[in-house]
């Protein structure tokens, strides 16, 4: 059996309310909340970035699983918020976690999908026996231009998954990918904020890829929508995952438990994975979980996991997603600009 | 053994001397000290805490001598953080004691105002462990603040009590013509000053100032002399101290210095102590055995105390590596009644400290 | 860009990232920061990562800071006891100064410490934050 052995999540403590952002930019906050179903979003502290978030999420994954970092043979980081254009986050993880130097390590970029691609790669290495454990981490301090609608969602957080053969809590039963060249959202080299196609990010991009990947995994591996106790989707806003579930014929009450975007916004690479971590925090043995990630540009990976008996041993071993959602300090827009390093300073 | 007399000395008024290079500023006071002593020197010891960091100059002794046209003399620079001045005096003292030299000059100089205030913090903080303390943002002030908290807690003082120290220093500074601040401070001035590292406020911090002082020490002649010098280091990291309400290096240096001089704390008529932050002045008095541990602030409430007639770091100013040389002249002049009201007694003590209780030098002067 | 020393940062990475101290092989005394010779006389040490949880034993809120921290002030800095006789000077983060209490349980977090201007190195290290808040 191969699958997830442990999981770790990290959400920075600071939050800004949608209302506060709307106040600054002259938007109607009730309308914004209604459109995106995002009440507030997480903001990284002044001393945080994708590197520190990746370290925190992965430390928690190791702690939860009681895993010796030296037994991890591969580490992948999916992010679109690298503090360095050139210099890996994965190598910082190797040192910060105290891993062996004999390790496959790389940072991956495919918008918000990269970390889930790392999951497939890590599982592959475990399957071939090249590594005992593999880890993938999604971590972002997501960018959104101030005053532009993306700002209401772009937020910060991270999630890490350790995969292996022993001590599996969520067996990976199936995976299916769907990729096409669809320019719904991009950020040019050197550009500080992404551009996007507004409504174009919906039908031709998010829905086409998410639905096709989900249908692909079901059709190819013989699942029905009713087989899933929970379904978790990439969450650019609160409406998209619910609509995707409805299109697939999955009842809304199976999607809602995995939705985090309403409380923390879109953490890009960590978005679907934080939803998945939240489900793992509460799942019961025998539950089946559909996880569908999405990255602009565009592609989706759809996974099916079966929860094992070991799950109960790992829950509550470290901070739960629910607890992190509750544990927060509200900041105003001025502090938000400072924390996100969006004030121009002499350095 | 040879005696070591203080044959002459000169101070530069402290301040922000934007118009002087560090070597020339030191040369001015050295020139005056040599003129007063009227002797030829065998060597020059230069004390500077931060000359390469703040003033971009090494080999300072040579450039000071060049400025005075003095050739061929041996010169050595001593860096011991804030304790540099006293350490250079110690080196000069040992050179005379050994019989190798007869007359030696010591010049202490530092010019923090060649830098911006934040850069001064950077430079001043290099006395901490650069890799495990300064790296994470600690400064000497932050450690002083934690020691102040511990002291106030241990001996049940309020911040108003600690404020007695800067008030006394300002009182003393008024009558020192070389002081940076020459005006009295009231309790509300201290209490209303900005918080710099809680519980410490701006009035608890001695301002960093540019300064230079020179002294000529000789084995011949009469006059006041250095009776003993002792230096002790404390190599326990701040985090591992067993006690935060005493200065170990000071106590250890003081014990040896008193013993060598053959005096006891009761014989001390005046003291100049290292009060870069007010709490250190309090702890220095107790470390020198001049006040019982924990009693200093109660004592200060009852009135004057013969400590830091110069105004200390708070009113005279923190001249960093030059401080020890200032203090030696201040104590000597207080014993002689020169520029200061003459103190009633024959012995004075100077206390100089490097880092946060990492090293202390205690010097006993007698007339 | 100040051109901070890369080797200084690099060689201290085990301490900065993982709180690696030295334990004397003879008498088991723990040292952080590392030393070369144990007080017992032994020179044989092994690397050991210190516990990542501890309690705050003293602190101050620092407003007067050096260049690297000008835009981060005030800093809450204190001593964290992570083992018997090991107290680490550390920044305390993710908490408002008025909520800090002595004896508070804290846990290590991996954070940015300073950056060498816009183009130079980003330097990281452990800080501590409250466990229960």
Image: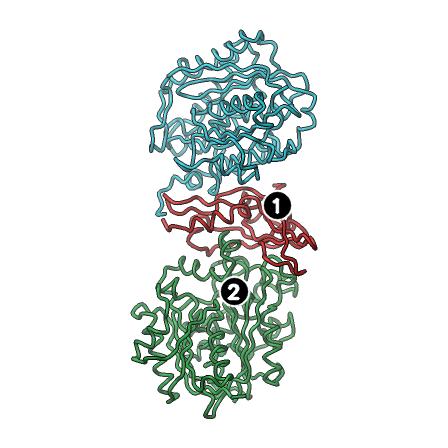
Chain colours: A cyan, B green, C red
Q: Residue at x 67, y 20 (%)?
A: A308
Between B250 and B170, the one lying in front of the other is: B250
Residue A184 placed where, x, y %?
37, 19
Q: Which residue is mark 1?
A: C49
Check the residue under mark 2 and report the chain it is in: B
Q: Secondary structure at mark 2?
A: loop
* Image position of B11 (left or right of B351): left
- Mark 1, Cα crowd under 10 Å, few <14 / some 14-19 / many 20+, is some
Residue C122 placed where, x, y %?
43, 44
Whether callout 2 and callout 1 share a subunit is answered: no
- The quadrant of the picture occupied by the N terminus of chain B is bottom right
Q: Which residue is mark 2?
A: B355
Query: For residue A144, which quarter of the picture?
Result: top left
Q: Residue at x 62, y 47 (%)?
A: C48
Nearer to us: label 2 or label 1:
1
Residue A218 placed where, x, y %?
55, 9
């Amino acid at each position: 059996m191969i699958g997830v052995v442990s999981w770790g999540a990290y959400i920075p403590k600071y939050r800004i309310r949608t209302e506060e952002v709307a106040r600054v930019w002259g938007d109607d906050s009730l309308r914004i909340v209604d459109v995106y179903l995002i009440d507030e979003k997480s903001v990284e502290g002044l001393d945080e970035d994708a590197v520190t978030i990746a370290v925190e999420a992965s430390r928690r994954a190791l702690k939860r699983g009681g895993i010796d970092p030296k037994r991890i043979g591969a580490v992948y980081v999916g992010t679109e918020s690298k503090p360095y254009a050139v210099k890996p986050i994965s190598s910082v993880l190797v040192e910060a976690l105290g891993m062996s130097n004999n390790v496959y390590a790389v940072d991956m970029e495919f918008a918000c999908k990269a970390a889930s691609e790392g999951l497939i790669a890590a599982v592959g290495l475990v399957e071939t026996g090249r590594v005992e454990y593999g880890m993938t981490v999604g971590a972002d301090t997501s960018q959104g231009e101030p005053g532009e609608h993306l700002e209401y969602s772009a937020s910060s957080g991270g999630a890490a998954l350790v995969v292996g053969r022993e001590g599996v809590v969520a067996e990976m039963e199936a995976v299916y990918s769907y990729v096409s060249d669809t320019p719904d959202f991009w950020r040019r080299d050197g550009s500080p904020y992404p551009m996007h196609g507004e409504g174009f990010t919906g039908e031709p991009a998010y829905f086409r890829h998410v639905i096709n990947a989900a249908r692909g995994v079901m059709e190819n591996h013989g699942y029905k929508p009713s087989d899933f106790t929970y379904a978790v989707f990439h969450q650019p806003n609160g409406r998209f995952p619910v609509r995707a579930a409805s299109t697939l014929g999955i009842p809304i009450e199976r999607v809602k438990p995995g939705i985090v975007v309403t409380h923390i916004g879109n953490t890009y690479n960590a978005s679907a994975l934080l939803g998945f971590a939240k489900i793992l925090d509460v799942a019961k043995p025998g539950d089946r979980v559909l996880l569908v990630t999405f990255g602009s540009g565009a592609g989706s990976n759809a996974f099916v996991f079966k929860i094992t008996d070991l799950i109960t041993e790992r829950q509550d071993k470290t901070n739960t997603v629910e607890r992190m959602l509750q544990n927060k300090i509200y900041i105003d827009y001025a502090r938000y600009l400072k924390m996100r390093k969006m004030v121009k300073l002499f350095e | 053994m040879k005696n070591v007399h203080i044959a002459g000395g000169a101070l530069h008024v402290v301040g922000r001397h934007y118009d002087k290079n560090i070597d020339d500023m030191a040369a001015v006071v050295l020139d005056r000290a040599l003129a007063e002593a009227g002797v030829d020197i065998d060597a020059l010891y230069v004390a500077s805490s931060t000359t390469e960091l703040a003033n971009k100059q090494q080999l300072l002794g040579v450039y000071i001598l060049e400025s005075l046209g003095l050739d061929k003399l041996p010169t050595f620079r001593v860096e011991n953080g804030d304790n540099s001045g006293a350490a250079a005096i110690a080196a000069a003292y040992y050179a005379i004691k050994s019989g190798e030299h007869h007359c030696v000059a010591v010049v202490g100089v530092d010019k923090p105002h060649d830098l911006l205030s934040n850069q001064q913090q950077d430079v001043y903080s290099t006395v901490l462990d650069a890799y495990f303390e300064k790296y994470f943002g600690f400064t000497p002030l932050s450690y002083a603040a934690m020691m102040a908290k511990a002291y106030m807690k241990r001996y049940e003082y309020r911040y108003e009590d600690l404020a007695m120290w800067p008030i006394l220093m300002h009182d003393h500074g008024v009558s020192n013509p070389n002081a940076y601040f020459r005006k009295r401070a009231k309790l509300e001035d201290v209490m209303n000053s900005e918080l710099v590292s809680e519980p410490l406020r701006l009035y608890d911090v001695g301002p960093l100032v540019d300064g230079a002082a020179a002294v000529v020490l000789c084995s011949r002649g009469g006059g006041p002399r250095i009776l003993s010098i002792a230096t002790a280091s404390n190599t326990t990291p701040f985090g591992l101290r067993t006690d935060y309400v005493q200065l170990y290096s000071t106590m250890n240096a003081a014990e040896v210095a008193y013993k060598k001089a053959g005096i006891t704390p009761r014989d001390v008529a005046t003291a100049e102590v290292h009060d870069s932050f007010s709490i250190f002045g309090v702890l220095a008095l107790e470390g020198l055995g001049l006040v019982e541990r924990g009693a200093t602030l109660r004592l200060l409430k009852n009135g004057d105390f013969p400590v830091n007639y110069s105004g200390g770091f708070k009113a005279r100013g923190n001249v960093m590596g030059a401080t020890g040389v200032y203090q030696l002249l201040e104590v000597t002049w207080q014993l002689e009644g020169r520029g200061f009201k003459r103190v009633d007694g024959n012995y004075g003590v100077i206390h100089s400290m490097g880092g946060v209780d990492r090293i202390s030098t205690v010097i006993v002067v007698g007339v | 860009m100040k051109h901070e020393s890369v080797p200084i940062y690099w060689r201290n990475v085990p301490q900065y990232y993982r709180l690696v101290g030295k334990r004397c092989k003879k008498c088991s005394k723990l040292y952080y920061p590392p030393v070369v010779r144990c007080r017992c006389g032994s020179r044989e040490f092994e690397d050991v990562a210190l516990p990542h949880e501890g309690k705050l034993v003293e602190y101050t809120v620092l407003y007067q800071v050096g260049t690297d921290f000008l835009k981060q002030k005030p800093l809450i800095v204190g001593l964290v006891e992570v083992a018997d006789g090991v107290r680490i000077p550390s920044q305390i983060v993710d908490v408002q100064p008025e909520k800090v209490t002595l004896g508070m349980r804290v846990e290590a977090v991996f954070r940015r410490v300073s950056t060498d201007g816009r183009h130079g190195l980003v330097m990281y290290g452990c800080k501590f934050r409250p466990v229960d808040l």
